[in-house]
Image (cartoon, rainbow, N blue to C red):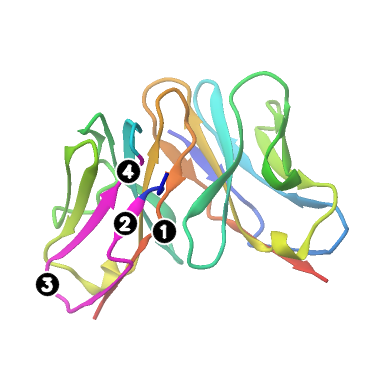
Amino acid sequence: DAGVIQSPRHEVTEMGQEVTLRCKPISGHDYLFWYRQTMMRGLELLIYFNNNVPIDDSGMPEDRFSAKMPNASFSTLKIQPSEPRDSAVYFCASNPPGTRELFFGEGSRLTVL
Amino acid sequence: AQSVAQPEDQVNVAEGNPLTVKCTYSVSGNPYLFWYVQYPNRGLQFLLKYITGDNLVKGSYGFEAEFNKSQTSFHLKKPSALVSDSALYFCAVGRNTGGFKTIFGAGTRLFVKA
């Protein structure tokens, strides 16, 4: 299995631009999570989905952030407009039915100038 | 609410010596507890978990963790450290009811000296 696939691996953009991060979970996994990692705040849960339905988005920092999961094999995290404080590594993770073990992607490192 | 505390930013140990990375948690109800490891520029990798049963849990790469309900702790241990164990270690907690939210601690950097 290819594992959780995230793209892009690195993104550098300017303040005010729209950013879209993409995630392909492992086939058969029914939960998908978006986390953000920074030195200051550690690993924060932003949102998670079950069977493509958002379950808890209480960690999404502001209305500038949105996430979708149109089907079982694809999810996006969008930031519009981006700000320098959004600079972080964004991780997508999925877990298979019946377990709580998270399988993480390699992350998308976002730098907003 | 769930929370995890990892009181040490960094743990230093000599190769061959036992290592312990500390974790305490707070959660209502029975906890699900996890340890993950992160190598530079990589995603987190699952090491082990406690759901129920024996308080001593064995995981990957010779790691184990001991669940202590009275102290609300879940410390990670290894009898003999390797230089290749040097990495960032995260403790995480979830609830057994009410959703699949998993909350991570701040992480502890383990440095194993040759």
The local secondary structure at tag 4 comes to loop
Which is nearer the eye, A57 or A30?
A: A30
* Residue A21 belongs to magenta span: yes
Which image quarter is the N terminus of chain B in? top left
Which image quarter is the C terminus of chain B in? bottom right
Which is nearer the eye, B100 or B10?
A: B100
* Percent x, y of residue B65: 71, 38
Q: Which amino acid, by three-letter code, is at mark 3?
A: Gln
Q: Which amino acid, by three-letter code, is at mark 1?
A: Glu
Q: Earlier in the sequence, mark 1 or mark 2?
A: 2
The local secondary structure at tag 3 comes to loop
Q: Earlier in the sequence, mark 2 or mark 3?
A: 2
- Which label sits in the foreground, 3 or 4? 4
Q: Marks 1 and 4, how far apart in space?
A: 12 Å
Confirm or deny contact between disc 1 and disc 2 (CB under 8 A): yes
Judge from the rendering whether residue B39 lies leftward or rightward of residue B55; answer left or right.
left
Q: Residues within 10 Å of mark 2 (few under 14, many from 20)?
A: many
Identify the residue under disc 1: A106
Q: Chain of mark 1?
A: A
Identify the residue under disc 2: A6
Identify the residue under disc 3: A17
Q: Which residues are magenta?
A: A5-26
- Which label sits in the foreground, 2 or 3? 2
Identify the residue under disc 4: A25
Confirm or deny contact between disc 4 and disc 2 (CB under 8 A): no
Q: Which amino acid, by three-letter code, is at mark 2?
A: Gln
Judge from the rendering whether residue B41 lies leftward or rightward of residue A31; answer left or right.
right
